[in-house]
Image (cartoon, grey):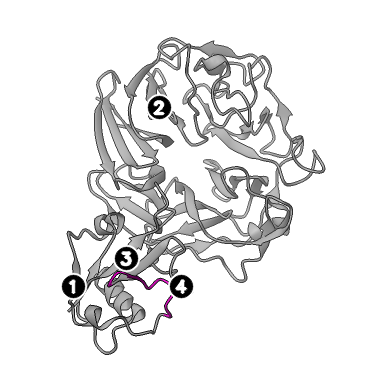
Amino acid sequence: MSAVRVLVGTRKGAFVLTSDGKRSRWDVGGPHFAGWEIYHVKGSPADPNRLYASQSSGWFGQQIQRSNDGGKTWEPVGNQFVYDGVPGSHQWYDGTQHPWEFKRAWHLEPSLTDPDTVYAGVEDAALFRSTDGGRTWQELPGLRGHGSGPFWQPGAGGLCLHTILLDPVDPKRIFIAISAAGVFRTDDAGKTWRPANRGLRSEGIPDPKAEVGHCVHRIAMHRSRPRVLFMQKHWDVMRSDDAGESWHEVSGNLPSDFGFAIDVHAHEPNTVYVIPIKSDSEHFPPEGKLRVYRSRTGGNEWEALTKGLPQRNCYVNILRDAMAVDALDDCGVYFGTSGGQVYASADAGDNWAPIVRDLPGVLSVEVQTLP
Amino acid sequence: MIRVVLPAHLRRLAQVDGEVTLQVDGGVTQRSVLDALEARYPVLRGTIRDHLTQRRRAFVRFFACARDLSHELPDTPLPDEVATGAEPFLVVGAMAGG
């Protein structure tokens, strides 16, 4: 029988939640790395027992942990992230230039085919790759070398490279997203990059339609249709039908088009999920009602999913890496909150229940569907 | 033997309980103690000092004998009480909440 493993990163450790395919009874494992911030945990598509975790601390820096047994045991691997060449500078909050400084790894994206190859999106924004299971890390310098780096600026969370999408059809194509620079795409396996932000409009930068500088919060794709991308921007939910060459808004009837998380149904490439947040200054759901919104039309027409979610006095946030789907039929949808709840729906969002209610604030949620 | 006390986060990372005792050959300084510590526990590389510059991380402090040694030069001899093992060398996470 199938099983599901939910990998949860929190502000004070990692948790591994497991269930059979019914997804009604859950075991909660952890905390792993108690006391450390776990920005992200993700499993290898090529070997589901190979997991990678980003463990960090403002005091003691970065660690990368690796598991070969599905999260039962872990070993620290390489934690040295050195920018290629002279790091240079990016824009600081006040518009002055600020030197590039490594702070933490936000997102780990294992290769689709090789368990020992994994990408890391880091703050200050850069893309690193390991081909030895996380022991050593090398920057893919063409991204920062694109030339626009001095115009990149940190969002409220820092200048972070938070999204890495590996194209399942074209192994040389990768999309990444940076707050606040925008989306970049490579078609040569990371040697060269170009911005992919045409159609975005952001009021917080001098030229609202600039090539770079947009605070993209998250992008998502369906494996069967990698040229179609969905984006939750600082404000606006966007869609691209041409692999990021251009974007158009699909916010439609959402109560707020601000938010962080966005994901796509495992079997319906036109079914998209977002969790609206009231505003950039009020990081909680509109009206105190925690609602996931689902579009079955690829955007513009959205329905509120509320059954089992708190519909009053709810003032949590859902961060950009904290929503994921499983590959079972019906598709399961999962998200974690700043209040420590992890909610799950085993029927594509129609009904929800908390798996666990009182974890530390959730930073990330990933899901593995196991045979 | 040199006695080193690590903060809880680093004890957990290095999988040690209580104090660490280290053999340090030659002069007993911040640098030689941390070199010996990292040689024994490679996982601690980068957690107390920057990998490349070897500078103390900003939120890490060094105390011994009721004194703050954080701003001493790395090659300044540590107090005799640390060198003889009478007092421990304390690696401390800065008092900044969390």
The amino acid on which the numbered mark 3 sits, given as a three-letter code, is Val
Residue B47: percent from the left, percent from the top? Answer: 38, 63
User: Taking the image as drawn, is residue A146 in sight?
Assistant: no
| Residue wearing tag 3 | B91
Q: Read off the magenta span.
A: B65-73
Give the chain of mark 2.
A
3D distance between C-alphas at marks 4 and 1:
23 Å
3D distance between C-alphas at marks 2 and 4:
47 Å
* Same-chain status of marks 2 and 4: no
| Residue wearing tag 4 | B55
Say whether residue A106 is left or right of residue A79.
Answer: right
Q: Nearer the viewer, residue A342 or A148?
A: A342
Give the chain of mark 1.
B
Q: Residues within 10 Å of mark 3 (few under 14, many from 20)?
A: some
Quarter residue B45 falls in: bottom left
The amino acid on which the numbered mark 1 sits, given as a three-letter code, is Thr
